[in-house]
Amino acid sequence: MRSDVNEVEGQIPLTRKDFISDQDVRWCPGCGDYSILTQVQKIFPELGVPREKFVFISGIGCSSRFPYYMNTYGFHTIHGRAPTIASGVKLANPDLSVWVFTGDGDALSIGGNHFIHILRRNLDINIILFNNEIYGLTKGQYSPTSELGKITKSTPFGSLDRPFNPPAMALGSSATFVARSVDVHGKHLQAMLQRCFEHHGTSFLEVYQNCLIFNDGAFRELTERGVKDDKLLILEHGKPLVFGKDRDKGIHLDGFTPEVIEIGEDFSENDLVVHDENDKNLAVILARFTYDDRLPKPVGVIYQSHEPTYEDLLEAQIEKAKERLGEGNLGELIRGSDTWEIT
């Protein structure tokens, strides 16, 4: 998000309380959505943007209640179509900081077409996808990100659908910013939200989010103290891909095939891949870790590139057309030669 949407000089600093609305939060007790809401309300006062410059837009689902709980402008729209509304808001009001909050069902099922097109267009919009790998609002059916063989109310003998891989899908849609975090990793999630805000273009952040009612423990390996260090790969630009409780494991590439190696007598950190968030080939490889149980789950900024935004290109195109054709006249355009009367 561009930094020209900045704090007005002399404005009273905002606090978390300024972003808490008067609405009762209606999620199941213990839901991971509470943690995400908390981190958003904590980090947003530090972004230096007046509240009236923020717009939160959602579709349908548990995550899509988000606009009610933020004391900003917002739209609760229709299933899967939040990117469409967000595009219109941004094009009509380019100085606004526009955020889409969605879920794995809302974004990747009925909204899949809208999701890929907003990414390829690269408007200056932030998309935060809550991924709990289940349909929570409609009571526990399998979702587009549920693992193969998932037993749910709608798949009593196991899902036969291969799941979508959100980071891979975003990269395939020419996304210019792809990141991942976990609901209960507060500081990390705040850092990723900050990076989304700073990115000029469409930022996509996937947040692993626990649904304790219909898919409890789906990401237990990434959150429990005794095991998370061996299952979580924290990406840091310019640093080797090291993980493990004793930081004695890392990722080595055998050609294009990633493998886990132990740092010790046979291997050192010099044998590990160094993360480069500007390397799309590496990003594609990291995205493939998602459903491979032999590899840790990467979190952090997977990929970032700097490309012109859709609204920047549109503004330049309009100015060029004005230079060539003049300001134009809307009335003349409506009554032009391409209209006719029916008698």
Image (tube, helix red, strand yellow):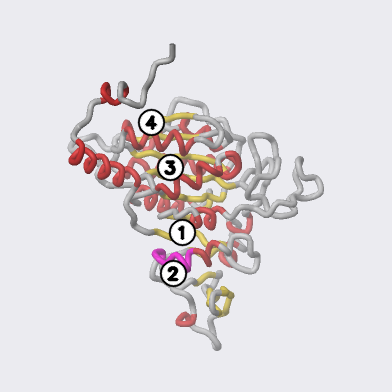
Identified by mark 4, the residue type is Thr
Q: Please tell me whether residue 52 is drawn above or below residue 32 in the rendered image.
A: above
Q: Secondary structure at mark 2?
A: loop
In the rendered structure, which segment of residues is drawn in magenta? 277-283
Q: Which residue is mark 3?
A: 40
Q: Residue furthest right?
A: 157
Q: Secondary structure at mark 4?
A: loop
Q: Which residue is mark 4?
A: 72
Image position, residue 55 (x, y; %)? 38, 34
Image position, residue 112 (x, y; %)? 56, 44
Q: CA distance from mark 4 to mark 2?
A: 36 Å
| Left-right relation of 86 to 219 | left
Among numbered discs 3 and 4, the one appearing first in the sequence: 3
Image position, residue 81 (x, y; %)? 51, 35
| Left-right relation of 324 to 94 | left
Among numbered discs 1 and 4, the one appearing first in the sequence: 4
| CB contact under 8 Å: marks 1 and 2 | yes
Q: CA distance from mark 3 to mark 1?
A: 17 Å
Among numbered discs 3 and 1, the one appearing first in the sequence: 3
Q: CA distance from mark 1 to mark 4?
A: 27 Å
Image position, residue 103 (x, y; %)? 56, 42
Q: Which residue is mark 1?
A: 300
